[in-house]
Image (spheres, rainbow, N blue to C red):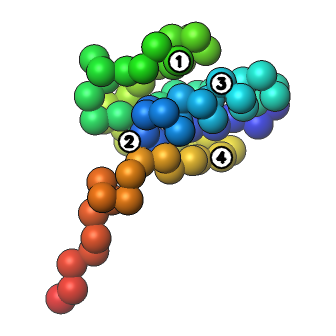
């Protein structure tokens, strides 16, 4: 079974998690900034939010954050 980690637990991340779980993927977890504000859809698939993470060992990583949340690299 392929495993998935989702960065961002909003509407898109939650919907993808439910669909992927139904399709047979394992959901390792979600990377979130505020683990206490997690959508109920994540509770449906019995997954855990991660706030601080050192290593992701999933086969697939999906980034589902808003573009405005992605930090642009600095020019030196």
* Residue at the disc numbered 1: 41
- State which tag comes first along the sequence, 2 or 3: 3
Does 2 sit above or below residue 28? below
Q: Position of residue 65 (x, y in %)?
A: 41, 48
**SS for dot 3:** helix
* Residue at the disc numbered 3: 18
Along the viewing direction, whichever of 37 and 73 lies nearer the viewer: 37
In the image, what residue occupies the spot 68% across and 44% down? 59
Q: Dot 4, crowdedness within 10 Å: few (<14), some or many (≥20)?
A: some
Gap in angstroms between the C-alphas marked 4 and 1: 20 Å
Gap in angstroms between the C-alphas marked 3 and 4: 15 Å
* Residue at the disc numbered 4: 60
Q: Quick check: marks 2 and 4 in contact, CB under 8 Å?
A: no
Along the viewing direction, whichever of 55 and 47 lies nearer the viewer: 47
Q: Quick check: marks 2 and 1 in contact, CB under 8 Å?
A: no
Gap in angstroms between the C-alphas marked 2 and 3: 25 Å
Query: Which residue lies most toward the front here?
Result: 11
In the image, what residue occupies the spot 21% across and 86% down? 75
Along the viewing direction, whichever of 30 and 57 lies nearer the viewer: 30
**SS for dot 2:** loop
Q: Position of residue 17 (x, y in %)?
A: 62, 29
- Among the 4 quarters of the image, the one containing residue 14: top right
**Mark 2 or mark 4, whichever is nearer to me:** 4
């Amino acid at each position: 079974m392929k495993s998935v980690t989702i960065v961002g637990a909003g509407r898109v991340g939650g919907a993808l998690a439910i669909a992927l779980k139904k399709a047979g993927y394992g959901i390792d977890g979600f990377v979130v900034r505020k683990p206490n504000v997690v959508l109920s859809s994540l509770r449906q698939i019995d997954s855990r939010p991660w706030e601080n993470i050192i290593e992701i060992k999933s086969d697939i990583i999906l980034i589902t954050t808003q573009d405005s949340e992605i930090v642009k690299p600095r020019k030196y």
